Image (cartoon, helix red, strand yellow):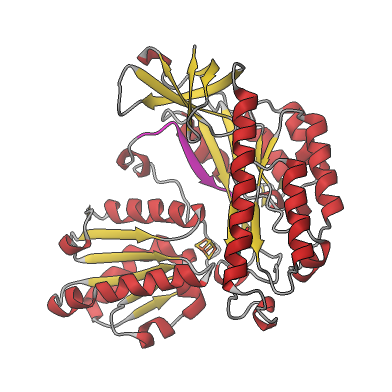
Amino acid sequence: MHRKVYLKTWGCQMNHYDSSKILNYLKLNNNIIVDNYIDSDLIILNTCTIRKKSEYKFFNFLEKLRILKNNNNNLIICVCGCLSTQEKENIFLRNNLVDIICGPQSIHKLNKLIYKFIKYKKKIIDIKSYKIDKNIINKKDFNFNNIKLNTYVSIMEGCNKFCSYCIVPFTRGSEVSRSPEKIIEEVCYLSKQNIYEINLLGQNVNSYSGIFSNGKLCSFSNLLNLISKIDNIKRIRFTTSNPFNFNNDIINSYKYIDKIVSYLHLPVQSGSNKILKLMNRKYSIEFYKELVNKILNVRPNMIFSTDFIVGFPGESEKDFLLTLDLINELKFDHSYIFMYSPRPGTKSYYMKDNVSLIEKKRRFKEIKNLIDNNIIYWNKKMLYNKYKILVEGFSKKNSKFLFGRTENNRKVYFLGDKNLLGKLIYIKINDISNKNYLYGNL
Ligand code: 5AD
Ligand code: SF4
């Protein structure tokens, strides 16, 4: 039974990664993917609940589908992602638009759920957590993708940290690591499909703890080491790390494994120890700075990016200023800033959300200004210096230009020949007038 599928995704890289798997599973059943929901008869909505705003966006979108759904008995609407595990059957009750609810751990069963729904015409929910690996490599998987040079590979999912503001431990469940052999098999396969850069993905990659088939444990540093041995893989990135789990073995990986990029996303959330404690982050600012210094000792050219939450309950002007100080001191590059949003069921939901929206917006803007300055600071440091880039493709505007990315994620355009595609080459940066991309010479 072929369907015309429209899929919309909200949320983090993990959710987008899941969406690519969902598409692959659906394509295996000969469904066709369409770009417009008007033309579809199966709508998959991969949801996010990290902040209230992402939930709003989903419910607004769902309402847009009401007329379509009422006029087409054949249309199936399926909700996947974090809202499924957070709201469960309530999603059915809140409106009568949704037919199937499929949790993040059940996406490999989607074809079966759809089949069952069509057969029995009864609403279906599957939000169980399965022990089996939903990321099993499907050799057909990648035939569908436009072959790229870089891709994500999920290594673990879920979180055991219970930061007081965060919904993830409730929606994605506790930490589950994939088997190292499966990950290696997948990376080897990808490396033969022109994938040169791997981004290891997980809510908390540095607490990865896989088990080999012989029963031995595989830590994150072990895994990095194994992946670095795969010839065609030229660059390794990973996201997201928790400062608390960033142990000396992982730090030392930077010493021994050149393939790991000198760019690290290390969420700090706040510069104030008082707020970090209320957030249950389990580290102090002193610990965070020491970690940064330890990493800089083995990788002097490391650049850090981070996440901030502004307006957490109890965040005073003094606490906020400490965050600004930290940004000036550590010179965080491109970073994510979020206004605190209370999430039902989390610990901080019961704290008084006492920073006004106006104040949250002001703090957001102040941090953004500092980060923008830091981005320019790093761009200036790059001017007239040589950087390694992985050449990814042609400029859309002028096909004489190729582009690639530096380790610190700067897109660099340069004049060059197509045989450079997929190569790691040195480029001298000679124009930083645009904040979003740079120009260079071979
Ligand atoms: N409110 C605002 N930001 C949040 N984040 C997580 N939960 C919340 C929340 N309740 C942010 C954190 C995290 C990023 C993925 O999202 O900064 O690192
Ligand atoms: Fe959103 Fe978090 Fe779920 Fe990702 S894991 S989709 S950020 S709620």
- Image check: 379 left or right of 137? right
What's the residue at 80%, 50% (across, down)? Answer: 288
Q: Is residue 144 above or below residue 354?
A: above
Res 312 → quadrant: bottom right
Q: Is residue 136 above or below residue 70?
A: above
Q: Tell me if I can see residue 77 in this picture.
A: yes
In the current view of this chain or complex, which residue is farthest to the bottom? 93
Q: Is residue 210 above or below residue 277?
A: above
Give the main secondary structure of the magenta stretch.
strand
Residue 125 in the image: x percent, y percent?
40, 78
- Please state which of residues 333 and 149 is positioned toward the viewer in this rendering: 333
Residue 162 in the image: x percent, y percent?
70, 69
Q: Which residues are magenta?
A: 147-156
Residue 29 in the image: x percent, y percent?
26, 55
- Image check: 324 left or right of 406? right
Q: Quadrant of the N terminus?
A: bottom left
